[in-house]
Image (tube, rainbow, N blue to C red):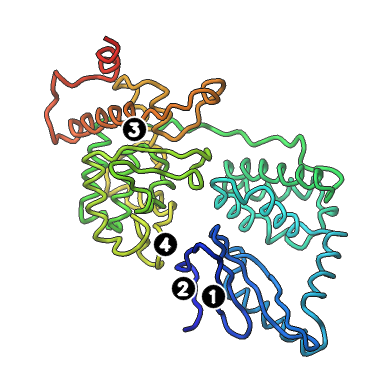
């Protein structure tokens, strides 16, 4: 059977490493750790050899096949691909390019860090087209200024994130002896205006029920993902990429590898969120993702689809005034937590934020019970906002829960 991207993604790690054949000597090596790498087998001057050519998904199937073809051409011309690779690596080490620095930075700094997809995307879209083949020694401060200016014109906040990432990269290059100086040190960030948009009760009710209107012709899992952001206060990216394997009984457990702060985050699954999961399961089918993409096999919906959906159907949804984003739904939930008397530590734990200072170092308590009560209060309050239940004088606030526990 021909090797495909789907087959590669379905090649799960086993107790021992194994190989998946790709044809004409190309194969994919799958390690117990889950790492996948491309290799080629060939015979040169009567000696069987094996050469590693790249890791998946950094090197795609198409790129691996092209490298294999190039290696076969070299062999026909009397060139050993392994020798050629060593010579090219020696040349790069002597005079590395930005592309070389980016690869080394990924290998040494980003491999085990959470939320690297956004960093990779920033570099791939904004930097590699201009700098990939540039020698690091030739990149000046002026080059960086012009590149960041171009990004800033269309995405001011992203330009600041990119500045921070590039500054780290060049500092890394200085530490590794790849560069003598960091040309970005001391560059100022562009001013940022912190968003403060919060939906009030009337807007929350309008938003919730408008998503069910036929004129809001969004893909249903996208609608359900938007509701889930408001319900759970999770990051839009955490929701859109949620996996069924992350559901542990009555809790949604985001592993540290997918968490922005590098720590596992547990959120209780209460009735309203459970109802959403039951509904979206019909559309997910056998996909590992809860909110399955409508057009890409075994992929989740794209986080940008949430923002684009709100923007595209802003008129049909009917919320006027300042535009709002999926992240504003998360901020709205956090604001409601405060109104309900939920303490800041529990709220920050629900948001997946790392506790700061000494508290973050010494307080390793999980707050599972507190998070359960807090989200219960929020679901009760949301049902009142939506008119699904009447306000009750016996609704217990979080401060009253703590008071009762202390007695």
Which is closer to the viewer, label 1 or label 2? 1
Reply above or below: 85 against 354.
Answer: below
Q: Earlier in the sequence, mark 4 or mark 1?
A: 1
Q: Earlier in the sequence, mark 3 or mark 4?
A: 4
Looking at the rendering, in which quadrant would you find the C terminus? Answer: top left
Q: Residue at x 82, y 62 (%)?
A: 92
Q: Quadrant of residue 89?
A: bottom right
Q: Earlier in the sequence, mark 2 or mark 3?
A: 2
Task: Say if mark 2 contacts mark 3, CB within 8 Å.
Answer: no
What crowding class fits label 3: few (fewer than 14 Cα within 10 Å), some (14-19), or many (20 or more)? many
Q: Identify residue for label 4.
A: 299
Which is closer to the viewer, label 3 or label 1? 1
Could you tell me how far apart the alpha carbons at marks 3 and 4 are, in whole angstroms? 27 Å
Task: Say if mark 1 contacts mark 2, CB within 8 Å.
Answer: yes
Could you tell me how far apart the alpha carbons at marks 3 and 1 are, in whole angstroms? 46 Å
The residue tagged with tag 1: helix, strand or loop? strand
Could you tell me how far apart the alpha carbons at marks 4 and 1 are, in whole angstroms? 22 Å
Drawn side of residue 213 relative to residue 70, left or right: left
Q: Identify residue for label 1.
A: 20
Which is closer to the viewer, label 4 or label 2? 2
Q: Earlier in the sequence, mark 4 or mark 2?
A: 2
Task: Say if mark 3 contacts mark 4, CB within 8 Å.
Answer: no
The residue tagged with tag 3: helix, strand or loop? helix
Residue 393 locus on image (x, y percent): 14, 18
């Amino acid at each position: 059977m021909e090797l495909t991207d789907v087959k590669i993604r379905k090649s799960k790690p086993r107790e021992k490493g194994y190989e998946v054949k790709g044809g004409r000597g190309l194969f994919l090596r799958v390690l117990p750790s889950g790492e996948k790498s491309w290799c080629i087998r060939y015979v040169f001057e009567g000696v069987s050899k094996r050469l590693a050519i790249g890791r998946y998904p950094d090197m795609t199937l198409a790129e691996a096949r092209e490298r294999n073809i190039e290696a076969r051409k070299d062999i026909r011309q009397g060139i050993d691909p392994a020798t050629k690779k060593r010579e090219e690596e020696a040349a790069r080490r002597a005079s590395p390019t930005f592309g070389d620095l980016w690869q080394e930075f990924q290998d040494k700094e980003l491999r085990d860090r959470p939320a690297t997809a956004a960093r990779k995307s920033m570099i791939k879209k904004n930097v590699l087209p201009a700098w990939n083949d540039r020698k690091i020694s030739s990149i000046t401060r002026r080059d960086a200024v012009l590149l960041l200016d171009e990004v800033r014109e269309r995405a001011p906040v992203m330009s600041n994130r990119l500045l921070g990432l590039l500054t780290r990269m060049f500092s890394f290059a200085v530490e590794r002896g790849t560069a003598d100086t960091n040309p970005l040190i001391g560059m100022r960030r562009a001013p940022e205006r912190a968003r403060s948009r919060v939906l009030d009760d009337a807007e929350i009710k309008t938003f919730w029920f408008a998503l069910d209107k036929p004129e809001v012709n969004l893909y249903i899992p996208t609608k359900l993902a938007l509701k889930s952001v408001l319900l759970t206060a999770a990051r839009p990216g955490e929701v859109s990429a949620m996996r069924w394997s992350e559901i542990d009984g009555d809790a949604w457990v985001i592993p540290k590898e997918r968490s922005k702060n590098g720590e596992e985050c547990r959120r209780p699954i209460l009735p309203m969120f459970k109802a959403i999961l039951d509904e979206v399961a019909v559309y997910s089918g056998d996909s590992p993702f809860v909110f399955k993409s409508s057009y890409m096999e075994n992929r989740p919906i794209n986080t940008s689809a949430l923002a684009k959906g709100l923007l595209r159907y802003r008129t049909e949804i009917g919320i006027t005034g300042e535009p709002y984003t999926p992240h504003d739904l998360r901020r709205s939930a956090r604001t409601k937590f405060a109104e309900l008397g939920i303490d800041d530590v529990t709220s920050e734990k629900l948001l997946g934020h790392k506790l700061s200072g000494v508290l973050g170092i010494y307080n390793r308590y999980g707050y599972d019970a507190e998070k359960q009560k807090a989200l219960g209060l929020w679901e009760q309050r949301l049902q009142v906002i939506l008119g699904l239940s009447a306000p009750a004088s016996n609704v217990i606030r979080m401060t009253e829960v703590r008071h009762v526990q202390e007695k």
